[in-house]
Amino acid sequence: MRRTLVLNAGFEPLSTVSLRRAVVLVMRGKAVVEQSHPGLRVRAAQVDLPVPQVIRLRRFVRVPFRQRAPWSRRGVLVRDGYRCAYCGRRATTVDHIVPRSHGGGDTWLNTVAACAQDNHRKADRTPAQAGMRLLVQPFEPTPADALVLALELRDGEALPEWLSPAVPAGPATSGVSVPSAA
């Protein structure tokens, strides 16, 4: 399912919404399409518009400041690129580095994406106790990084150039890399 990034009137990232919700916002005149998926269109009896990748609200919406991105299983899988932190294969589960039964919680720094085999092999132990090592270190994405990650851009898809520099890239800053527009 395609997700669409919603920007405030001042171009600040607000959230991601479903394609259907994005089309409704555009059709009702509440938002404008800033970036669309190349070559894809939404067509109906009286509608023909590009499939929105980024939309901007026409009116400014005041949102309370959020310092932290909310944790979610899907967020961990997306953050880690659906790659197992132990072997690098496709990940379908989330593993707690310090197991919940040992006091570990559902936090960005205590969870990593894992394949089912490694998650089962590690079981109720820490990676050191199980003789396993992490290939990547978990990090906590910023709220803006989490929104960009939620878009799950495929190879070849890129955010507009005017939005990309606002998102830090590389492990030195936050670990999120955004494909450059070419």
Image: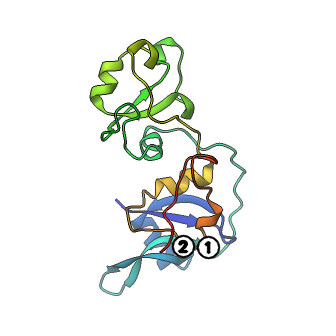
Question: Residue, x 44% and y 37% (percent of image)?
Answer: 73
Q: Nearer the viewer, residue 170 or 56?
A: 170
Quarter of the rendering occupied by the N terminus: bottom left
- Residue 7 visible to an observer of this rendering: no
Q: Residue at x 60, y 44 (%)?
A: 69
Mark 1 belongs to which amino acid? Answer: Trp
Instruction: Indicate the position of residue 107 as horizontal and vertical percent values.
Output: 55, 31
Q: Which residue is mark 2?
A: 160
Q: How is the image coloured?
A: rainbow
Identify the residue at image location x=62%, y=56%: 168
**Considering only vertical position in the picture, is 99 above or below 40?**
above
Helix, strand or loop status at disc 2: loop
Give the crowd class for mark 1: few <14, some 14-19, many >=20 residues within 10 Å: few
Residue 66 image label: none
Please tell me which residue is depicted at 43% across the width and 12% down the height of the picture: 129
Residue 8 placement (x, y as % from top left):
64, 67
Image quarter of residue 48: bottom left
**Contact? badges 1 and 2 (CB < 8 Å):** yes
Q: State the residue in front, 22 or 143.
A: 143
Image-based side of 86 in relation to 165, left or right: left
